Amino acid sequence: MLRKELQKLRLGKVELYLLERIEERGCIHIALLDPLKTKLEEAGKLARLCEESGSDAIMVGGSTVFSQNHMDLFIQEIKSKVSIPVIIFPNNIQSISRYADAIWFMSLLNSVDWYFIVGAQMQGALSIKAFGLEAIPMGYLVFGGDTAVAAMGRVLPLPTNKPEVVVCYGLAAQYLGMRFLYLEAGSGAEKPIPPEVIKAVSENVSIPVIVGGGIRTPEAAEHAVKAGAQAIVTGTAVEQDTRRLSEIVAAIHKADKT
Ligand code: 1GP
C-alpha cells in the first residue's frame, strides 16, 4: 500500500527503500564512510561489516573530498561488497560519482554562502542527470562547533538552546519540498545534537529527521531515537571500533520509539 502510494509521487528506488525501512523499524542506521579517512583497499570490507552489523545503508562523503576519481574507485569497491544502497553525501561537485545508487541532493540551509545553498547544486545538476543518479532532496542544518563542516560550509551556527529556531528551518525545508531533514553536529563533534532539539523538530515537521555527528555510544543513539530521530548516521564510530558499531545499530533498532 505504502509503495503504491509513494510510486505515484515518482519517488526513486533508494528513497522508497529508506521510507519503507523507516516504517518497519522506526529508526534506521546509516554508516558514513569518508574516502579520506578509510583506505581504498579497506572500504569494501568495512562496508560489508556495516551491513553485517545491521546498517540499513551506506553514505559516502566527507568535508574534504577533492577527487571524483577517488570517489569513483571508493564507491565501486564498496558496491562490490554490499547489497544495501550506497548514497553520496556530497561536500561539493567533485563528490558526484556515477557508481552510487543515489545522492543526497542537499542544501546547507544555514550557510551564509549562496554557493552551499544552491550554487554547487546548480553546478552539479547536469552531471546527476547525465549519470542517471537518483537525487533525494534534503535540507541540511549544521550546528556550530569546532567541526570541518561548519568551517567549510560557512555556517551561521544554530543555537542548541533555541529549538524553536531549528524548527523554523525544518519547516522551511519541508515547505520548500525537501523530503528529508538532516540535523548535523559535525563529524567528531564533542557532543551530539541535544535530544530536546531533535524532539522539537520531529514533533513539528512531517519529513523524516536524520541525526548525525558525535554519536559514539549506544546510549547516545538511543537518546536520539527516543527523541524522534528516524535515521542515525555514524561515521567516527564506524572507523574506530566495529564492535561498538553493532552495539549502536542494535540500540537503534530496538529502542522504544513511543
Ligand atoms: C558527519 O554526522 C556525520 O556528517 C557523522 O559524524 O563522524 O561524529 O559520527 P561522526
Image (spheres, helix red, strand yellow):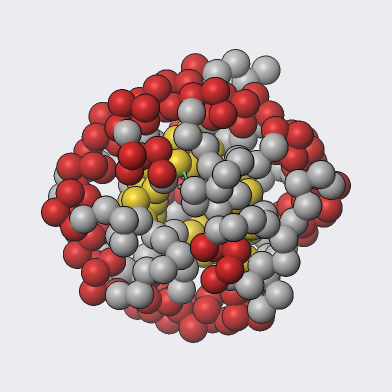
Q: Closest to the observer: 135 or 117?
A: 117
Res 202 seen here: no
At x 17%, y 49%, the residue is 42
At x 74%, y 40%, the residue is 197
How many labels were placed on the picture?
0
Q: Is residue 88 above or below residue 126?
A: above
| Quadrant of the rendering where the C terminus is positioned | top right
Q: Is residue 7 above or below residue 251?
A: below
At x 83%, y 53%, the residue is 165
75 relative to 168 in the view: left or right: left
Counting from the top left corner in percent of width and height, residue 46 is at 23, 42
Q: Closest to the observer: 42 or 106?
A: 42
Res 47 seen here: yes
200 relative to 244 in the view: left or right: right
241 relative to 205 in the view: left or right: left
Counting from the top left corner in percent of width and height, residue 63 is at 45, 65
Examine the image and state in which quarter residue 211 appears: top right
Q: Is residue 235 above or below residue 114?
A: above
Q: Is residue 139 above or below residue 84?
A: below
Counting from the top left corner in percent of width and height, residue 228 is at 66, 31
Q: Closest to the observer: 164 or 123?
A: 164
At x 22%, y 38%, the residue is 48
Counting from the top left corner in percent of width and height, residue 209 is at 63, 43
